[in-house]
Image (cartoon, grey):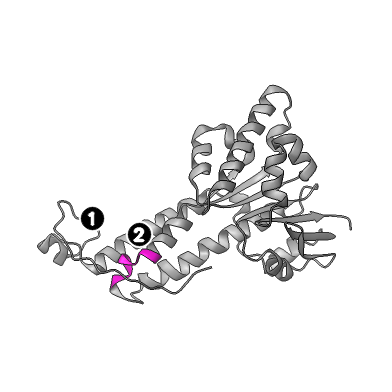
Amino acid sequence: MGAPMSGLVIRRPSPVATLPPHCCASCRTSLTVCDACARQGRIEEATQKLAAAIKSIHPERRWSRTVNSDIMRERLSGVAWWRVTRGDKVYGKGDDFDPKHLSEAIGQWQRLVISGPDSGLGKTAIAVAIFREGLDFVQSEYVDKYSVGVGAPSWAESQRVLDQLDFYSNARFVAAIDLDDPRIMSTASRAPILVIDDAGHETKSGGFDAEKRAARMSDLLDRRERSSRAKTIVTTFGNSEQWESWYGGRIVRQWWQMPTATVLEMRRTA
């Protein structure tokens, strides 16, 4: 998920009008931010942003940290059948639902739909685990490591590292039903990594309101698909036929049928 740091860019310090509160005495004397203090500032900023990304997950879902774990294996014990497809190719299926096999089958993903008609299967747990794996990797590799001074002092100037921090620390988890809120919809539209939980739930009210909510979701899914960088996980109780009735054929092609779309289907019965 990460890559070794390269292409470090060293910038010459320049006088600043207002120094950050974490700056050392030397910085205050010279009115410049030294490498060590610049690094500390980036660490503090990244820590706060990663905490905000984790806080967006519902508190009852935050226990899920990694797909391949004993607690996940126990959580998914009710799954009797599963299949992972990408376009028309099958990457894993059967009745032996081992999280290790699941993780390998999902592999590298840009768009991932996790579908199952039953509640309590573990769809959201899997989505949160994949989401958290990315955040925890960045915390370990780009925050914790450098907070104890490991690595070059110019870490704060490495564009690769800063890009990784920005990408993952702006990740968000949203419930489909909450996309009525313009602020949440705006956040969901901009998030580089997004989990949309329980797509289809917004249509259950029926009538004109349900149509409006489905139209908003369809627009969001379309925009996420057209972004070359955005990574999106959607959990849903619906299948491709239901998605077509809710969101239209274009969305089904984008999220269920294209070679770049990964679909995990789960059921309680084989």
Magenta span of residues: 154-160
Query: Disc 2 marks which residue?
Result: 44
How crowded pointer 1 is (Cα within 10 Å; few <14, some 14-19, many 20+) is rated as: few
Residue 64: in sight, yes or no? no
The verdict on residue 22 being magenta is no
Give me the residue at 74% from left, 66% from top. Answer: 73
Name the residue: 25% across, 60% down: 22
Q: Quadrant of the C terminus?
A: bottom right
Specify whether 146 is left or right of 31: right
Mark 2 or mark 1: name the one nearer the start of the chain: 1
The amino acid sitting under disc 1 is Pro
State yes or no: residue 155 in magenta. Answer: yes
Q: In this rendering, would 166 be left or right of 181?
A: left
- Asked whether 51 or 116 is in front, the reply is 116
- Residue 88 % position (x, y): 76, 58
Q: Nearer the viewer, residue 99 or 227?
A: 227
- Where's residue 85, x and y in %? 75, 59
Q: Main secondary structure of the magenta part?
A: helix
Separation (CA) of disc 2 from disc 1: 11 Å
Q: Please determine whether, in this image, residue 147 is positioned above or below residue 228.
A: below
